[in-house]
Amino acid sequence: MFFDSLEVFSSIEDLGRSTDRPVFLALGMFDGVHKGHQAVLDCAKKMAGSNGVAVAFTFPEHPASYLRPESSPRLIMDKEGKVNRLLKEGIDGIVLRNFDREFADVEALHFPAFLIARIPSLSGLCVGENFRFGRGRNGDHELLKKIGKQVGLQVGIVESQMVEELPVSSSRIRDALSKGCITSVNNMLGRKYEVSAFPSKGKGLGKKIGFPTINLSWNPQARPAFGVYTGRVSITGINAKQYAIANYGLRPTVEEDAKTPLFEIHLLDGLVGDINSDSKQKYTMELESFLRPEKKFDSLNDLKNQITIDLKTAGELR
């Protein structure tokens, strides 16, 4: 049976049963699908050429959430976001396998054989130079290359991609996000960082003070710094992107005990349509710049004055 369409598999076995064409796996967590990940995906696509299939093999949750839940990193992307981005990168398919005891117990020396037993047409593997595998993370790229040669697998080792004179990594992106360094985040991703969600019903305070907003209940694991951002907004069903300013945070000036952050978008050219909690229009904002951290103002009037300043700054950056 040939692999003829984009598909997402929950097991390696399902992939193996779905094709007899040569399979080339890009292995990794791919959290953020940043420039380094893209290079690994490109390696698999190049190996696959026109006759094979390039497949990303990854996990919905970080392996550390199973092995060391108390120290598991917060994810830049949720499962849906990662799958969508991997497919946009032109990969032919994805194995999204849960990390479990069976996988954790595979010895490094047996790892390629473990994959071949489940994917008979497996022909190659692509990994980053810092890739670790096998029980206790004992295997590195050199061992993978050595074993691959023994079992007849092509193995591509991809060097780390450099941005701002340092290797790109998901941990660097998480750190930059937490500090509001959105330009660095975008440089490491190779694209604009996106906030995407359906609108939720707000209290209408923005409209009352002259700055109507679209409220998105959006709360990722790896949060950007609370504060004010500029960027471009795309809306389901509307082609043109619209310039906007947004506040992400707990709204301390108007809500003393808020626990869940809200992403509030103000379109500089005005609202489009009637926004309500039942809207089927998804809003996606590409963040371009970070203007300032969120703060508590002494009064609504002070808040309005600061928003006016923010809008002027945003207009100058447009």
Image (cartoon, helix red, strand yellow):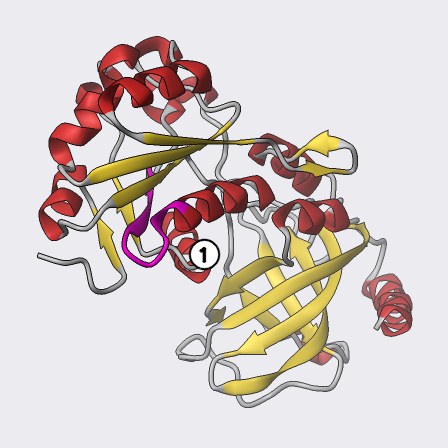
The span shown in magenta is 47-58
Q: Residue at x 53, y 43 (%)?
A: 39
Where does the N terminus fall, quadrant-wise?
bottom left
Nearest to the observer: residue 302 or residue 153: 153
Residue 140 placement, left or right of 184:
left
Q: Position of residue 145 (x, y in %)?
A: 39, 21
Eyeballing the image, is 1 above or below 164? below
Q: Quadrant of residue 119?
A: top left
Q: Position of residue 9 (x, y in %)?
A: 21, 49
Q: Amino acid at mark 1?
A: Arg
Q: Residue furthest bottom?
A: 273
Nearest to the observer: residue 8 or residue 180: 8
Nearest to the observer: residue 86 or residue 16: 16
Q: Residue at x 59, y 45 (%)?
A: 35
Please indicate, yes or no, whether residue 278 appears anywhere in the rendered image: yes
Q: Position of residue 182 (x, y in %)?
A: 73, 49
Q: Residue at x 67, y 39 (%)?
A: 178
Q: Residue at x 28, y 56 (%)?
A: 51
Where does the C terminus fall, quadrant-wise?
bottom right
Residue 287 placement, left or right of 122:
right
Task: State the SS at label 1.
Answer: helix
Residue 173 placement, left or right of 290:
left
* Residue bearing mark 1: 85
